[in-house]
Amino acid sequence: MPAPAEEFLTDMLPRQTAAERAIHGGDAGPRTALWSTADPVSLFGAWLPIRTGWADVSEAFRRVAGQFSDSREYRFEVVAAGASGDLAYTIGFEHNTVSVNGEPTTYTLRATHVYRREDGEWKIVHRHADRPPDEPGPAETLTETHSRYGR
């Protein structure tokens, strides 16, 4: 992997892993802090309708965090990553063991993130996550709750 990508991953992955563990434990604050508040930002969530604009994206994070608790495992398996100038990306699998609305579950998502460097710090500007085709469906309660927030 080229040096800029290695430097980017060394900086970003530990912070992002900590933020994902926090949101899966019910705390959206660390994930929110990793994101740019400067539009355009977008979220193509695994079980959410598309969200665009910081106000919409940050509200989605608060709602999602309210449904997660008891994060027992979060691991990001990097498949590909790159960085050039002030833009970077990661592609990989997120492996989670967590409770969703009080029900323990384990699942994997495919996740792509796009990052922009702002004032010397990497910020997430886009996330697209979905279930791999061979992965069992999400907990019924997660799907039902998120569908209520559709547009």
Image (cartoon, rainbow, N blue to C red):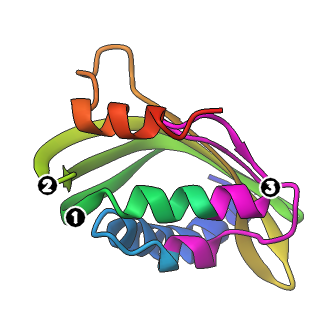
Q: Rounded to the nearest whole Å, what is the CA distance between mark 1 and mark 2? A: 7 Å
Q: What stretch is highlighted in magenta?
A: 31-58
Q: Rounded to the nearest whole Å, what is the CA distance between mark 1 and mark 3? A: 26 Å
Q: Which amino acid does label 3 sit on?
A: Gly
Q: State the mark number for residue 127.
A: none
Position in image of residue 119 (x %, y %): 87, 85
Would you say the residues marked 1 and 3 are in contact, meaning their CB atoms lie under 8 Å apart?
no
Q: Residue at x 78, y 72 (%)?
A: 37
Q: Does the magenta stretch include residue 15?
A: no
**Disc 1 designates what residue?**
69
Would you say the residues marked 1 and 2 are in contact, meaning their CB atoms lie under 8 Å apart?
yes
The residue lying furthest to the front in this view is: 148
**Disc 2 designates what residue?**
102
Disc 1 residue crowd, few under 14, some 14–19, many 20+, Cα 10 Å: many
**Disc 3 designates what residue?**
53
Question: Where does the C terminus fall, quadrant-wise?
Answer: top right
As helix, strand or loop, the secondary structure at mark 1 comes to strand
Q: Rounded to the nearest whole Å, what is the CA distance between mark 2 and mark 3? A: 30 Å
Q: What residue type is labelled 2?
A: Gly
